[in-house]
Image: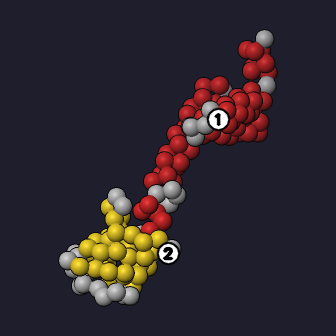
Amino acid sequence: MIEGFAETYPALTWLIAGLVLLVAEMLAPGVFMMWLGLAAIGVGTLVHFVSITFAWQVVIFGALALVLIAGALRLRRTRHPPRLNTAESGLIGRSARVLSFASGEGRVRVGDSDWAARLAQGTPAPAAGDVLRVVAVDGTVVVVGAA
């Protein structure tokens, strides 16, 4: 019965397969089945307008899937790294007011919190009240440099 349906309604078969893959992606997210589902929907749309053999449908599905997955991987690489829930993401680039410093180590205030701090290489010793910039985070110690 399924073979007859697929032969009679190839476009609808691809569209249903694509929707099933998209639903599967929602139930078990991994951002992989989504691209296969979109490729299947693309083939279904093409087959709706152009009559092509099943072999070519499979080839087009494979090509679309490869293009979509490659595009997603490229987009993922070019995006900035997530800036959520990490000490580095919340502190790097922020201003730090010097509370005290001696021998390259001291304390700074970033926002409403006091932090142990270390001077970045080449940064002159600051005085209390100077404003520096957080350039890195090393555990619970912020590394500060010239603003």
Q: Which residue is mark 1?
A: 25
Residue at image location 76% in from the left, 39% down from the top: 49
Q: CA distance from mark 1 to mark 2?
A: 41 Å
| Drawn side of residue 103 relative to residue 87, left or right | left
Residue at image location 78% in from the left, 30% down from the top: 12
- Helix, strand or loop for disc 1: helix
Q: Position of residue 86 (x, y in %)?
A: 46, 57
Q: Which residue is mark 2?
A: 111
Estimate how packed mark 2 is, as few (under 14), some (14 to 19) or many (20 or more) residues with alpha carbons within 10 Å.
few
| Drawn side of residue 50 relative to residue 66, left or right | right
Residue 32 position by quadrant: top right
Q: Is residue 126 among the parts visible in the rendering?
A: yes
- Looking at the picture, tell me which residue is in the foreground, 36 or 109: 109
The C terminus lies in quadrant: bottom left
| Drawn side of residue 94 relative to residue 38, left or right | left
**Outermost residue, top direction?**
1
Give the residue type at disc 2. Gly
Estimate how packed mark 1 is, as few (under 14), some (14 to 19) or many (20 or more) residues with alpha carbons within 10 Å.
some
- Looking at the picture, tell me which residue is in the foreground, 44 or 95: 95
- Helix, strand or loop for disc 2: loop
Residue 59 in the image: above or below residue 86: above
Q: Position of residue 61 (x, y in %)?
A: 60, 34
